[in-house]
Image (tube, rainbow, N blue to C red):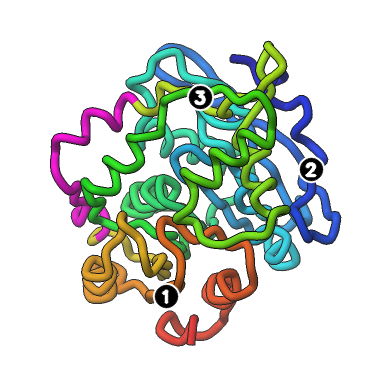
C-alpha cells in the first residue's frame, strides 16, 4: 500500500475546537527484514526547536490522536507524531510477523535520527507506551523523560481479548457517519467527547475505499501477532520497566481494563518510580483532548522542578 493513497484527503484537517494551526506532513524511510517502508509523521511547532517531543499512538490509532496535546505543547516543543507502520498514512509491512515492538523501536530510532537530535521526551499511549518502555530500557536511550498513557509492565489478558474482538476484522462502511457510529462503540472506553471530537477520532483512523465507502485505516494483519498472545495469560514486562531510569509519569484511566490500579501502585515503587495520575470516568485510554487531561502531562514534561514535584 503506497503512501500517496493515504495522504489524499488527510492533510489540512484541523482539530475540532483548535486554533487553526497546521501540522507539517512528512515521512522517513525505514528498514524491515524484507526491504524498505515509509513511516509518515506530522510535526508541530518550530522545526528548528531542539526540544523534541515524540508522541506515539495506540494499536489501531494514528498520530493525529495527539493534535490537541501537540497544539498545546507546540510553544515548548517541536512535537512529532508518527503513524506507526501499518497504520494511517504509513506503508504496510510485507510480512505480518514484523508487526511488533522490535520493528517499531527500530523505526523510532530511525525517526529520531532524521530529526537530528540526541534526546527526546516521549508520550506513548498503550502500544506507543510499550514502544517507549522498550526504547527507554536500552543503554544510552534517547528518551530523557517519558509519559506512559494507560499502559505499564503488566498487560491483562482480559484487555487483549476485548481488543481482539474488533482488531483486524476490516469492516466496511457506506458513509463516514456509519464509520463514526462504529468508532463510538469500539472506542467507548476513551470517555465522553463532543460530536466534533468524535468526528476527529473517526476521520483520522479511516480512509476512503475504492467502492466509495470507507474502511479502517490500518493493515488488518496488525492483529495476527496479538492473536498468539491470547493464550499466554497476563503479559509481564517488569524486566523492561525496572531497567528504565528516566523520569516517568504514568497516566491511567480509572476504569481501565488494561492497566490495573495495583500495577500502577507497583510502578510508583520500583524501576523509575513513576509519578502516577488517574483520570476519572475514562477506561482505556485517556485521549488528552481536554485541559483536565493535558495539564498534568504538560506540567510533568515542561517543569524545571524535581521529578517528585512535577505533577503536584
- N-terminal of the two: label 3 or label 2? 2
Mark 1 highlights which residue? 277
Q: Is residue 227 above or below residue 202?
A: above
Magenta segment includes 226: yes
Residue plotted at (78% across, 36% down): 11
The numbered disc on residue 13 is 2
Q: Please tell me in which quadrant of the rendered image residue 243 appears.
A: bottom left
| Along the viewing direction, whichever of 160 and 266 lies nearer the viewer | 160
The numbered disc on residue 229 is none
* Image label count: 3
Mark 3 highlights which residue? 171
Q: Which residues are magenta?
A: 224-241
Please identify, in this view, whether the residue under mark 3 or under mark 2 is nearer the observer: 3
Mark 3 nearby-residue class (10 Å; few <14, some 14–19, many ≥20): few
Residue plotted at (47% across, 19% down): 93
Please identify, in this view, whether the residue under mark 1 or under mark 3 is nearer the observer: 3
Residue sitting at the far left: 232
Q: How far apart, in angstroms, are the residues tagged by discs 1 and 2?
A: 31 Å
- N-terminal of the two: label 1 or label 3? 3
Label 2: element kind: loop
Label 3: element kind: loop
Residue plotted at (72% across, 16% down): 212
- Is any atom of residue 33 visible in this view? yes
**x and y, in percent, of residue 22 in the image:** 82, 49
- N-terminal of the two: label 1 or label 2? 2
Amino acid at each position: 500500500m503506497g503512501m500517496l493513497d493515504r495522504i489524499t484527503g488527510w492533510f489540512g484537517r484541523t482539530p475540532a475546537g483548535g486554533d487553526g494551526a497546521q501540522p507539517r506532513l512528512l515521512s522517513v524511510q525505514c528498514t524491515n527484514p524484507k526491504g524498505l517502508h515509509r513511516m509518515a509523521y506530522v510535526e508541530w511547532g518550530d522545526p528548528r526547536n531542539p526540544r523534541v517531543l515524540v508522541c506515539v499512538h495506540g494499536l489501531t490509532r494514528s498520530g493525529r490522536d495527539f493534535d490537541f496535546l501537540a497544539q498545546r505543547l507546540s510553544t515548548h516543543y517541536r512535537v512529532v507524531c508518527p503513524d506507526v507502520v501499518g497504520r494511517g498514512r504509513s506503508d504496510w509491512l510485507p510480512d505480518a510477523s514484523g508487526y511488533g515492538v522490535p520493528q517499531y523501536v527500530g523505526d523510532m530510532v530511525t525517526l529520531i535520527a532524521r530529526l537530528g537530535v540526541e534526546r527526546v521526551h516521549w508520550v506513548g499511549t498503550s502500544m506507543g507506551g510499550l514502544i517507549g518502555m522498550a526504547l527507554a530500557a536500552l543503554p544510552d536511550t534517547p528518551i530523557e523523560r517519558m509519559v506512559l498513557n494507560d499502559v505499564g509492565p503488566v498487560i491483562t489478558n482480559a484487555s487483549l481479548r476485548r481488543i481482539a474482538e474488533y482488531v483486524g476484522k476490516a469492516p466496511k462502511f457506506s458513509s463516514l457517519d456509519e464509520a463514526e457510529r462504529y468508532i463510538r462503540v469500539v472506542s467507548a472506553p476513551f470517555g465522553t467527547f463532543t460530536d466534533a471530537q468524535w468526528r476527529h477520532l473517526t476521520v483520522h483512523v479511516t480512509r476512503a475505499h475504492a467502492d466509495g465507502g470507507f474502511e479502517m485505516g490500518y493493515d488488518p494483519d496488525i492483529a495476527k501477532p496479538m492473536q498468539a498472545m491470547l493464550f499466554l495469560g497476563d503479559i509481564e514486562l517488569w524486566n523492561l520497566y525496572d531497567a528504565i531510569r528516566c523520569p516517568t509519569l504514568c497516566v491511567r484511566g480509572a476504569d481501565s481494563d488494561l492497566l490495573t490500579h495495583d500495577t500502577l501502585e507497583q510502578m510508583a515503587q520500583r524501576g523509575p518510580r513513576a509519578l502516577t495520575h488517574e483520570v476519572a470516568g475514562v477506561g482505556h485510554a485517556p485521549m488528552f483532548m481536554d485541559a483536565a487531561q493535558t495539564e498534568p502531562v504538560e506540567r510533568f514534561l515542561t517543569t524545571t522542578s524535581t521529578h517528585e514535584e512535577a505533577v503536584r
